[in-house]
Image (spheres, rainbow, N blue to C red):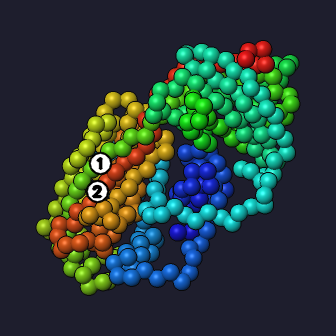
Amino acid sequence: MGGGRQAWCPRCDEVRAAKAGASCPVCGRQLLAVPPARPGQPQPGRADRLARRLRALVPAAAVGVACLVLVVVASAFAAGRLTRTTPSAPAPAPTTTVPGFLDEGPETGHRDFGWEIRDSELTVELRTITVGTGFSRLELHVDGIRRGREISALEGLRIRDADGRDLLLGGTVARIATAGSRPSPDGGTDTEVVLERPIDPSAVASVELRGLALARGVQERIGGTLVDEQLRDKASDNIDDTAWLATRRGCPGCQLRVACEDCSSVRLAGRAYRHGRVTIAVQAVGRVEQTAINPSRRRVLVTGDGGLSELPAWIDGSGGSAVITIAADMLAAVRDRDEPMAFNVVIQAQAEELVRGSWTITSAVR
């Protein structure tokens, strides 16, 4: 899966549709080159057929998705930046670095704090700051969060020294995604954020927050079937070249049916089958940040009939709308029956609720 338009986020452990060296659209971490797949691992039967079709899909993916997004935009909504989800197992991690190296380089400094303050029924404690050659990691502990919630982002982060000078470039960070959030064995929630440059931990006199984004995982399920006899016949012949799908004029007898099987926060806004790709438009019901199409760690999982084979899929869109695209030749490659080609779509994201407050954490409050 390597290539100029795909890179791996070591923090999210996900493959992103971006170049190596760019920032991860979810957590902001610098993306790395995708490690090459290990050789000598043949896949028998249907899996081998799926792999060949995936290779054939890659050159036309950008053009095909762009055309389909335009079709849906014309009928339903305006789409945003393309985000590809990982179709199968996570990309293998790169070779382990030298012991003592953290996110962006070797650790160069560390300070324990234990400062805390309470506001908006939440107690926030600054526990430690760890600094490396290219990063600063703040570890926080928060008490008062409802069960089943985690901290997905901090808002209005500001760090100052004893003279009131800002230690962060630009003064205040409007929003920064957390690098991790987990329940503490002693109660409450432990979380951490990683800044892109080092600060002097010994100079820190206060850490200010103006908001905490509390998140819970949500998902919606959509089921569908596709009938395309010509594609079915070519797939039965085991023909790998499916470029004809992108230029085929019309599709007599083709039928696409889609329905929400378990949807509470989104609704179907449209569907289409053009040039060998299934597109499904969805819209948020209510505030988008409370739904499964919230951009925070959003991804789409598509499986064929029976849910055994995970297929490549894309989710694209911003605001209250999104579009999902699926390659029809992949559905044909993993079908269990002649027709129709059944598939299942699961949209996953973090639904967020912002808690605003004024937490100014200093040594004077403990």
The answer to whether 54 appears left or right of 285 in the picture is right
The residue at 78%/58% (across/down) is: 99
- Does 56 sit above or below residue 268? below
> In the image, what residue type sits under mark 1?
Arg
Please state if 143 lies on the left or on the right of 57 as rendered. right
Front residue of 181 and 286: 181
Taking the image as shown, residue 265 lies to the left or right of residue 126, namely left
Task: Name the residue carrying label 1.
Answer: 221
Going by the numbered disc 2, the residue's amino acid type is Asn
Q: Position of residue 239 (x, y in %)?
A: 32, 83
Marks 2 and 1 sit apart, C-alpha to C-alpha, by: 7 Å
Kindly identify the residue that appears in the image at 43 percent across and 62 percent down: 87
Mark 1: secondary structure: strand
Q: Position of residue 72 (x, y in %)?
A: 31, 50
Viewer-nearest residue: 281 or 293: 293
Image coordinates of residue 159 in percent, x first then y, are 75, 26
**Residue under numbered circle 2:** 344
Are circles 2 and 1 on residues that touch, CB within 8 Å? Answer: yes
Residue 26 visible in the shown view: yes
